Amino acid sequence: MQSARIPLLFIFMFWIFEANAQLFGGIPPSLKWKQINTDTARILFPQGMEKQAQEVAAIVRKLNEATLPTIGYRLHKIDIVFQNQTTISNGYVQLAPFRSEFELTADQNSFELGSLPWQKTLAIHEYRHVQQYNNFRVGLSKAFYFLFGEGGQSLANSLSVPNWFFEGDAVYQETLVSGQGRGRLPFFFNGYHSLWAADKNYSWLKLRNGSLRDYVPDHYPLGYMLVAYGREKYGEEFWRSVSQDAAAFRGLFYPLQKAVGQHAGISFGQFRRDAFNYFRQQTKIETDADLPARYARSQLHFSADEEFPHFANGKEVIFMRSSYRKIPVFVSQNLQNGKERKIRSRSVSLNNYFSYADNKIVYAAFEPDIRWGWRDYSVIRVMDAQTGKERRITGKSKYFSPDISEDGLHIATVLVKTDGSSQLQILNSRTGEIEQVIPNKEELFFTYPKFYKKGQLVAAVRNQKGEMALGLFGIQDGSAEYLTPFSMNVIGFPSVNKDSIYFTASRDGRDQLFSSVGGQLFRLSSPVTNLATGDYQLEAAEGRYAWTSFTAAGYRISTIRDGMVAVPIPANEWGRSLGTMDIHSLEKGPARLLDKIDPANYPVSRYPSTLKLFNFHSWRPYVNDPDYSFSLVSENILNTMQSDLFIAYNRNERFKQTGVDAIYGAFFPVLDGGFNYTFNRNALLRNQKVYWDELQAKAGLSLPLSFSRGRWFTSLQTGSDLVYNHSYFKGKFNDSIFGRGFVYINPYIIFTNQCQQARQQINPRFAQVVRISYNHAVSALEANQFLASSFLYFPGLALVHSFVVGAAFQQRDSMNNARFSNSFPFSRGYASENFYRMFRLGANYHFPLLYPDAGFGSIVYFLRVRANVFFDYTAVLDYLPNQEKYRGTFRSCGTEIYFDSKWWNELPISFGIRYSRLLDPDFEGRGPNQWELILPINLLSK
């Protein structure tokens, strides 16, 4: 654990979080990069994705013409990088350096993100962030840009414009310019609808910052409601004026809130209350008759998510349960007496979807590539539902939403290719071998396939326009028969029971249950139908029905015998409006612009991966106590080369340093190099302080490897530098100590292995961390230092408690020809010194004290207060000037109180106070009672 003895400027942490957010060197070198270069954006894409790149280039260029005036008039060209090797659906825009990244594997779940072609959704959403940043370089934010570069503007914008506006404004744009967008999807509002139905009236600070014990929607729907209301009430120019005043810090404290008050003529508090009331009045929630809402009201806090029920043997229902206290687990519940049996914890996965038949559970698990961070996989796992034994039947695959046949012999699944297309495949459930590839004649995107009658699959599909339908597909020839017309109503989670097909679809402002029987569509309802939000994942067997409902206490499973009412729906009425919210401004100006953008045909050229390796963009402070630095930072667009010119200060030895570092991650292994000069290093030598300057140059390599699989995250990093070091001793030691240049190596190994971690768990219940390093001089003189440390994590007495044991050993040579940096974790409370030999044991017990869910002034918000009681034992051996041996013992015990907090409603920081009782004398004369302010940097280093 790193600690700071002085208060830190938390605002500089924004730079740290931004710097650590990206996947450095994660792009496989085998990718061949192309580019489309326009006056608006440069699109960088792997070979094979030209169609999507042309579409994105055309969309952002048109958006720049049509929607830019609602946020400002400034244009700065953006680099957009396509990532097609990952299974994750995401995108982002960053300022330092100014670039955007699209993760282009579309999600199977259309309720959450919509069904538009994924590259189009990313373009209309993420380019709004580009427009925001382009127009927020004003006033004090502009001054920060001139002082600190793009990172300075990023910091200023983060402090002045809240994340709810960034994302709410972007969601509004995606809703405005398309026929869908999240603002038209019922699922997007489920969070707030569930809170209102359950009468959970949380404070503004809690809605902004979340909770570790209660369900709180994130800032996306919150921001959308505020932005949409502002556009509806005050016009399309309202947020342009408000956001630019805020970014300029025209109100130094709470700039956006003050800008809202100035331009709306009411306080920000009144504005947000009016916005919530505007949306709440449109929901018309009948809470008294809503049994899921009544269940949520009866729960003091979040209970658990119970999802994807499946009937087994007519006696049990198998489902997935996940909570804030426990990791996801497969559960079997007896339908008669309600008794439950844990089957097995789920392997690491992107979602909780699974299928069940013939006593087998099948699902897709997430696995990273061993080396490349931007390449990962979705593999099929098959589990025995009685024993919990599990097998991985595919590797290095991109399979999603698998379904197992009734006889348990075959698996139907969706393969998503790196060019964005999808394909239905039939696999052997024992070997994972491909038995059948189903032709995709209409270039559809398939989701959630299910075995139907012999020779047919049913699946929810998206066409090239983003419209969805439920279809039957011939396994042999790919022939299609559609059970619903194509429309913007999203569809998902089909299931089959004999001739009946059940599914969920968005209609009339809610996600509702439907069935298709003999070509006739029916809307389904029951005495426990969810009237406030949505019902999902219906399964039927032998007259029983089970499904999940979205509530403020978690997804809730309902089961009934019979009692399901089916109302016929004419096919010609299926595709009517989603009917989510009444926002008139969404039908004005560039409404549904996406449908009017013609395909582009821009020139395509090669993009060398080594182009513009040096791209200096920011001056950045960095704090990792005891090291503090200030750097001129460079990062190329593909994020394969990082370099910085820096000045630094070490608090332990009080030395100053200047230098340059660079790291290149496009190869295997990662290459690094650097040069620095250090002023006034010092150490204790035979009870006397020695001072010297130091010149150092290095070149090295490292091998970052990930072996994560199943339920464990496992990584191994090895490497070494070849370092030239020359020490220039000062004072009376100038002649008595022989200072000259020498070369040393510093090989190291870092191994981490941890299980999954639930939200409230302070640490993983099981984890192992081992670090080994060895500094060894290989020329001119003899010098060495060996350090090994490890930390073992175990469960505590309660689910969210953690017991951590640590051990460390360090030994250096006794000749004192050279002194290497001291990273030994000395007993807490004592002054740290580099003795000849040191051994440490430590024990920690972490547990929560309370969950305040409270803050003040929109400055700081406390989610949790937790404690750690510890005991440290360090034994040392050193040599005195007369060569006598010195043996010392340094024991301490004490308590640490941590505050898990959010600052300015956005930045998560855990800080605390440590009291150490020194049980042995300190060699620098410290008293027995020591107090420190602590700032955890890495929880896996106790």
Image (spheres, rainbow, N blue to C red):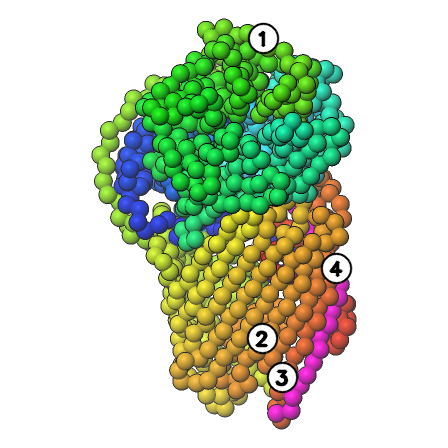
Residue 847 in sight in this render: no
What span is colored magenta in the figure? 883-903
Q: Amino acid at mark 1?
A: Val
Neighbourhood count class around disc 2 (C-alpha, 10 Å): few under 14, some 14–19, many 20 upward? many
Q: Is residue 463 above or below residue 356?
A: above
> Going from the N terminus, do you reach mark 2 or mark 4 first?
2
Q: Is residue 390 above or below residue 879?
A: above
> Going from the N terminus, do you reach mark 3 or mark 4 first?
4
The residue beneath circle 4 is 869
The residue beneath circle 1 is 567
Residue 671 in sight in this render: yes
Q: Quadrant of residue 823?
A: bottom right
Q: Amino acid at mark 4?
A: Val
Q: Is residue 900 magenta?
A: yes
Residue 536: % across, % down: 58, 24
Label 1 and label 4: CA atoms lie apart by 61 Å
